[in-house]
Amino acid sequence: MINSNFGQPVGFDLMFTIVPIIIVIGFVIVIGTVVFRGIKYAKNATSPKESVFARVVSKRMDVRQNSHNHNGQISHSSRTYYYITLEFDNGERQEFMDVKNLFGLVAEGDTGYAATQGEWIIAFQRNNGATM
């Protein structure tokens, strides 16, 4: 079908209308994600460090996998995030991201003083013999 005004197929105008909108939306999503992660990192990095007596109630891993296509070569990558859940004296529980590689050094049931900063756990000093 030919558009009599321009001599171009009807779908041609649609491409120049929708494609730029899709590109802008993708750009906004990428920039928004980068800004959001930067703000979240800055919030945690500038949070005060606190030390509190707690018990390790659980640990978990979150494995995220990505595939990339570079000129026909597909490469796979993965990243593992580690989390430790603490229970405090008042019974409240909170999950913290392990940013100091404590995951293999603590076990469920361990009690001691946990140093936290925002949503991160940055140290754990085991207290042998103490119970909550």
Image (cartoon, rainbow, N blue to C red):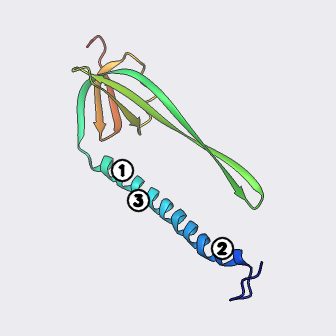
Residue 72 x, y percent position in the rendering: 78, 58
Q: Residues within 10 Å of mark 1 (few under 14, many from 20)?
A: few
Residue 119 rendering spot, x and y as whole percentages: 34, 39
Q: Residue at x 76, y 82 (%)?
A: 2
Residue drawn 74% across the image and 88% down it: 7
State the residue position of label 3: 35
Rendered position, 21 above or below 104: below
The answer to which image quadrant residue 115 occupies is top left
Neighbours of disc 2 within 10 Å: few (<14), some (14-19), many (20+): few
Q: Are marks 3 and 1 in contact (CB under 8 Å)?
A: no
Q: Secondary structure at mark 1?
A: helix
Could you say where residue 80 lies in the image, as x and y percent from the top left?
A: 54, 38
Query: Where is 112 relative to 97, above or below?
Result: above
Q: Secondary structure at mark 2?
A: helix
Q: CA distance from mark 3 to mark 2?
A: 30 Å
C-alpha span from label 2 to label 1: 37 Å
Nearest the camera: 104 or 43?
Answer: 43
Which badge, 3 or 2, is on the more N-terminal residue? 2
Label 3 vs label 1: CA separation? Answer: 9 Å
Which of discs 2 and 1 lies nearer the camera? The answer is 2
Is 125 positioned to the left or the right of 12 in the image?
left
Q: Identify the element where label 3 is drawn.
A: helix
**Front one among 128 and 1:** 1
Which amino acid type is shown beneath numbered disc 2?
Answer: Met
Please identify the quadrant where the C terminus is shown.
top left
Residue for badge 2: 15
Q: Quadrant of residue 13?
A: bottom right
